[in-house]
Amino acid sequence: MDIRPILQVALDLLEIDRAVEIAKEAIAGGADWIEAGTPLIKSEGMDAVRELRRTLPGVRIVADMKTVDTGAMEVEMAAKAGADIVALLAISDDSTIQDAIRAARKYGVEIMVDLLSAPDPVKRARELEELGVDYICVHVGIDQQMVGKSTIDLLREVVQVVSIPVAAAGGIDASSGKDAIFYGASIVIVGGNITRSADVTGSARRIREAIDHVEGAGTSRRSLEEEMISIFREVSTPNITDAMHRKGAMRDILPIIPGTKIVGTAITVQTFEGDWAKTVEAIDEAGPGKVIVIYNGSRYVAPWGGLATLSCMQKGVEGVVIDGAVRDVDEIRRLNYPVFASAIAPTAGEPKGMGEINVEIVCGGQVVRPGDYIVGDDCGVVVIPKERAYEIARRAKEVEKNESRLFEEIRRGRTLSEVAKLKKWEKL
Ligand SMILES: O=C(CO)[C@H](O)[C@H](O)COP(=O)(O)O
């Protein structure tokens, strides 16, 4: 008989009132277990577990203590607060795990051990099973996810070496949740993709549906590059600058056509006061997925206009960004092609050939290197260093998810300062 996979929702929030509300919505969508996430426990202590226990009778409560020492004491406090399962870290000493197990047996609760950051997680999983833990959690941490580490790859190794139930955690969504069950997990733990959704119940239901029907799972996953480009097309430049701690935005550069969006890698052009030879030669080096980024240095003489725009379109170039003037904007608007610039002027320069292509430039006050990622929308243009692009994409997605949740809370009648808990979290 197929055993129904467990959907555990991790309440990685800071306030218990919102956590309880989200928990109830998640249960309405098919969640089985509710986890007091580590951030919630750090913020509210064992009151978080008590309140979940009080408001969710009959629901299994997991306390993600991430215990790494004094195992028995932490298991006892969580058990007394109403937890059914207590989570420790696998990097704990064996003595911590063993004493936690003794306390768990005494209080009638179970032990889950999280492999997060374990040096040799497969070997440690085998050891933990021998020590007597009840569940193993294969977990790629939020920061590790941001740099592309995969929960599923590790899960496939761990399920080969243990026979106790295995949970999968770390950026799990409907697709990876389906894969996790397909590759042998019994539990999927989901945080942000449910708790930061504008529609918690709907998101939980989609993941419930996915893990209950795993046919077609294990399909080839997108490459990191495909995933990153897809995310950059979904998020906004404000989400990205938030993810970069308020950095990366070019100054005074806006779209000629409102509503246009560009995502691509930079082909840079350093030119002088309207000299358009190098800017036009850059088109020959560009193509789909490329953005031509030009430092022109003048707001009154344009190195770019309608003919260059048409040539770009013919080559499928993603878009053009100019620190300086652009002209023929009527033609550009008719062509409906994404050009971003800091000024509009009727005067063009000469094709003298001064300047360089694909060198490091400064555009809108931001350093731009060939290959850096460029994202532009109605709010402006942001440069993302190529070596951090995947991490920034994932972090920007988390920002977007969080904001969509705040929108929902405000739509339900709370003020922004209430949902942001400004009074509680102002810097002292
Ligand atoms: O333990 C955690 C963070 O330390 C989270 O609960 C776990 O990673 C699940 O959250 P998400 O689905 O957002 O990754």
Image: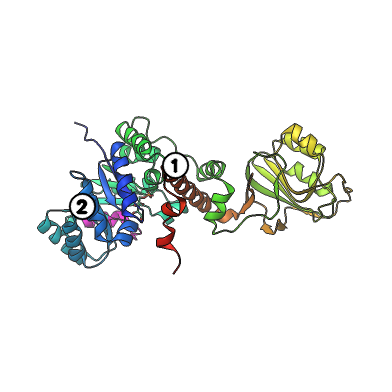
Q: Amino acid at mark 2?
A: Ile
State the residue position of label 1. Answer: 411
- Measuring from the top left, give residue 324's x and y in whole percent: 78, 52
- Would residue 267 appear left or right of 65 to someone viewing this image? right
Circle 1/circle 2 CB separation < 8 Å: no
For the point 79% across and 39% down, the residue is 329
Q: Residue drawn at (16%, 64%), measured in percent from left and top?
A: 99
Is 48 situated left or right of 297 in this image? Answer: left
Find residue 423 and report its horizontal and vertical position in percent: 42, 61
Q: Residues within 10 Å of mark 2 (few under 14, many from 20)?
A: many
Judged by depth in the image, the label closer to the viewer, 1 or 2, is 1
Left or right: 409, with 43 as reference point: right
Q: Which residue is mark 2?
A: 85
Is residue 8 shown in magenta? Answer: no
Q: Nearer the viewer, residue 193 or 361?
A: 193
Span colored in magenta: 114-129
Q: CA distance from mark 1 to mark 2?
A: 35 Å
The picture places residue 274, in percent across and down from the top left corner, at 84, 50
Q: Nearer the viewer, residue 1 or 198?
A: 198
Rendered image quadrant of residue 245? bottom right
Disc 1, SS:
helix
Does residue 334 sit above or below 55 in this rendering? above
Image quadrant for the C terminus?
bottom left
Q: In the rendered structure, which amino acid carries the disc numbered 1?
A: Arg
> Which quarter of the picture shows residue 126?
bottom left
Upstream in sequence: badge 1 or badge 2: 2
